[in-house]
Amino acid sequence: MRLLNVFIYDIVTRIYFTAIRIAALFNSKARKWVAGRRNVFRELENLKPSEGLRIWMHCASHGEFEQGRPLLEALKERYPAAELVLTFFSPSGMEHASWQELTDTALYLPADSRKNAGKFLHLVQPDIAIFVKYELWYHYLSDLHRRKIPAVLIAASFRSDQIFFRWYGGFFRKMLAYFNLILVQYRDSARLLDGIGLRKHAVCGDPRFERAANIAASAYRNEILEAFCNGKQVLIAGSTWPADEEMLSKAFASQKTDNWKLVLVPHEIDRKRISQFAEQVPGTLVYSALEKAGPGLASAKVLVIDQMGLLSRIYRYGTAAYVGGALGGTGLHNIIEPAAYGLPVMFGPHHRQFPEAQEMLARGIAAVVENADELVKALEGFARTQNQKEIREAAGRLFDENGGVTGKMLEHLLLSGLLPNKKADFQN
């Protein structure tokens, strides 16, 4: 049965990877996915043998890296001589330069196959492998298990409707069983793992709270944004998709939002979409076209940020936030980042699979909007000073309750024996 399952898995993954290669003929993101993997093994052949602790962390994209980053920073502090090898599945991870602050070695993960997994692990030779949230690849996990290399899944979040917990999900449960330790965000996830007989887990919380709080507390100034916001009420709309932008354009083309300004940060920089938005909302300015702060910024109503890597820091200029992805079917993006600044957060109706969304709604920090009218109504409520004060206080309590996640993760890694207890064990 196992061989049959592996055979079916291989067929499905080959079809999937072939589909990406075909899509590369028409889609720029798929082209980057394919091009980025062409020379991975050649790059790995230049990797020098490790003289100390070598940590391999795999993330699907930039969002997952932000969840794994606090643990990497803690490991680097504890083991200064440790080498970090990062891999990403999606181009969004490789294109964000923030990983360069931690390591020079970041690559695309080769497509999952027995041959690729074996070659990758032979060249990297990690002492521990850390997967973030939900990236599970059978051949990599089974080969790690065969080589007796510890594998850890961190920031994991499970739902009862996932395949692991279905009667036909035995093959995928086997993948989870290959992990030596699973660190989950919430107790509900731990109970689900208990229900399928997996006991090597611990509840640590969501590391995004810690990461977002650290970014919010760091110094940052942007003269263009300061001149644009100019003390006005500002909605920061982050990680938006076409459906989000259509709703926002209707809301900000209306006179009902004359007391508000909009900073729009699309999830993907698409010049055609930006041009369409500017046509619908006259007076829209584009960030890259502004060399410096000028007098026209104060009177403009909309500023589109067409530069990657700014969003988590510019929420500090907002009065409220809208986070994209939940109006359509792409998946809600990071709502913890704006909450770190005490901002009320709005998002679309498709949010049920995101526990942090349920928590923020229950505490009155967030609101669901499905159209332009509802968005305008929510902004009217958020404009009240008393409401803003109550939301900031509620957000502060939420972050206080979700602090110390990195320390908990490191503690469980040490207690489980997957990392050396003595700092000197892996130092030159």
Image (cartoon, rainbow, N blue to C red):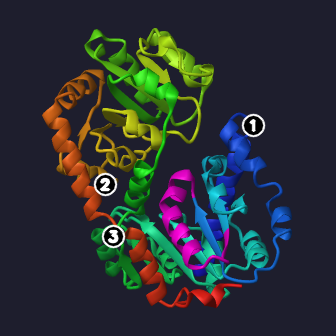
Q: Nearer the viewer, mark 3 or mark 1?
A: 3
Task: From the image, tell me which residue sits under label 3.
Answer: 189
> What's the distance in space between the residues labelled 2 and 1, CA to CA?
37 Å
In the rendered view, would you say 43 is above or below 118?
above
Q: Quadrant of residue 140?
A: bottom right
**Residue at (34, 53) in percent of width and height:** 354
Q: Where's residue 244, x and y in %?
A: 41, 29
Query: Sequence order check: which comes first, mark 2 or mark 1?
Result: 1
Query: Magenta residues?
Result: 60-84
Residue in front for this viewpoint, 188 or 212: 212
> What's the distance in space between the residues labelled 3 and 1, CA to CA?
40 Å
Q: Where's residue 229, x and y in %?
A: 40, 24
> What's the distance in space between the residues labelled 2 and 3, CA to CA?
13 Å
Q: Give the class, few, some or many, for how many residues have Cα within 10 Å of label 3's Cα (few <14, many ≥20).
A: many
Query: Sequence order check: which comes first, mark 3 or mark 1?
Result: 1
**Residue at (68, 79) in percent of width and height:** 126
Task: State which quarter of the image contains the C terminus.
Answer: bottom right
Label 2 sits on what residue type? Glu
Magenta residue check for 71: yes
Tally of numbered tags: 3
Task: From the image, tell me which residue sits under label 2.
Answer: 356
**Residue at (48, 60) in percent of width and height:** 67
Label 3 sits on what residue type? Ser
Q: Where's residue 413, x and y in %?
A: 48, 82
Task: From the image, tell me which residue sits under label 1.
Answer: 25
Magenta residue check for 415: no
Task: State which quarter of the image contains the N terminus.
Answer: bottom right
In the rendered view, would you say 235 is above or below 149?
above
